[in-house]
Image (cartoon, helix red, strand yellow):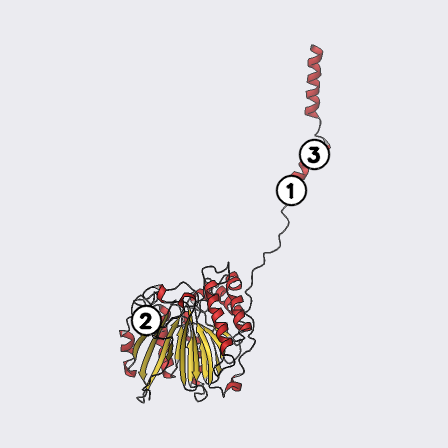
Amino acid sequence: MIRRILLVLLLIFITCTNPAPAFEQHLFISAQQTTQQPAPAQPAQQVEQVRAIASPRNPLPAEAASAGVTRFSFIAYGDTRGRRDGAQEQYEHSLIVDAVVATIKRLENGAFPVRFVLQTGDAVVNGRDARQWNKSFVSLINRITTDGGVPYFLAPGNHDVTGADKLDAPMRQEGLRNYLAAIANLIPADGAPRRLDGYPTYAFGYGNAFFIALDSNIATDEKQFEWIKSQLEGLDRKRYPHVVAFFHHPPFSSGPHGGAIVEPPAAALRLRYLPLFRRHHAAILFSGHEHLFEHWVERYEDGDGRKYRLDHIVTGGGGAPLYAYHGEPDLREYLRNNATQKVSLDHIVRPGLDPGGNPYHFLLVQVDGDRIRLEVTGVDWGRGFEPYRSNKAELQDRNRE
């Protein structure tokens, strides 16, 4: 019995004093090294870059080359941002694109071929997200520039570059970079006479019409204003009797952004740009922001007593969630401030009282010498949309002088 106890005590002593087996030591050291050494460096994650929209198959010629053109068409629409941006191609916008491409092909051999498309802004929900441009927007516009073959000119909306009112606002910069990357093949480059360097502000001439795209988010920016002023002052009005501007925020509207509300960009446009456009007798101002269609006519007299007309057209039915009529804006201060020119405003097309009365749509604009005609095309369930008791209007007064 005593011998058995001594044997057990001897085994315990040997176990406690001998080192661990070699393989156990190796495992312990390896584990210790694993916890102490940093993990291998991972490759830097690639930041997605916005793809440029494809160059148009039929770009506009140099301005001088189209000087004799007095008959052509162009298309205008806006606000294409969709519910699935970043996940899928914009479905509602695709309906517009289908109809636009079909219209371009239908008219290409006629007297009034479509030469380009204007878009009044809000291409995507969040312009700072490259996926939204690449996944949802760029491929659709490629159909217009390649299959349709025409240039596409986009003005920046608040969803594209944020609503910051300063060019260099930090929140704005990422969206602006993406916007400029998307349209890099479509607008004049920095340094060109028709581009304001560093800005999404540019112009172009075709035939007997001159077009200006401005950033209404920064409508208070003095440099942009002075550049547009210089473009208008240097314009050959015999060559360009028609001046058209397109931008995002409407100076006058009756949707949720208008009515009793006067947003800062609208106030700045009323104060600075509308007197400038009247001074140079602009023909049409296209805007969006309100997801509906409405039409205002501003009439005024110049210093010589001649009467003029300026059409304000809001076209925001390009695919964004539709809006409805919210009420008339208060125009008393605007009219009072411009009484010397006998300014008046006529709301000739008001939007529907519910979104169902304001379908997705685009505009076909026909330039015919000194006359301009407009045709509104509703798509999907909006086919048959007739905002003028027809879908056509002539943008001039019959008793014009």
Q: Which x, y percent locates residue 183?
A: 52, 71
Density class for disc 3 (Cα within 10 Å; few <14, some 14-19, many ≥20) is few
- Image quarter where the N terminus lies is top right
Residue that carries the numbered disc 1 in the rendered image: 34
* Residue named by callout 2: 350
Q: Secondary structure at mark 2?
A: loop
Q: Which residue is mark 3?
A: 25
Choose mark 3 or mark 2, whichever is in front: 2
Q: Is residue 332 above or below residue 94?
A: below
Q: Residue furthest front?
A: 384
Total numbered labels = 3
Residue 169 shows up from this direction: no
Residue at 44 percent across and 89 percent down: it is 238
What is the distance, in whole Å, between disc 1 and disc 3 at their CAs? 14 Å
Q: Amino acid at mark 1?
A: Thr
Marked residue nearer the N-terminal end (1 or 2): 1
Binning the other alpha carbons within 10 Å of mark 1 as few (below 14), some (14 to 19) or many (20 upward) gives few
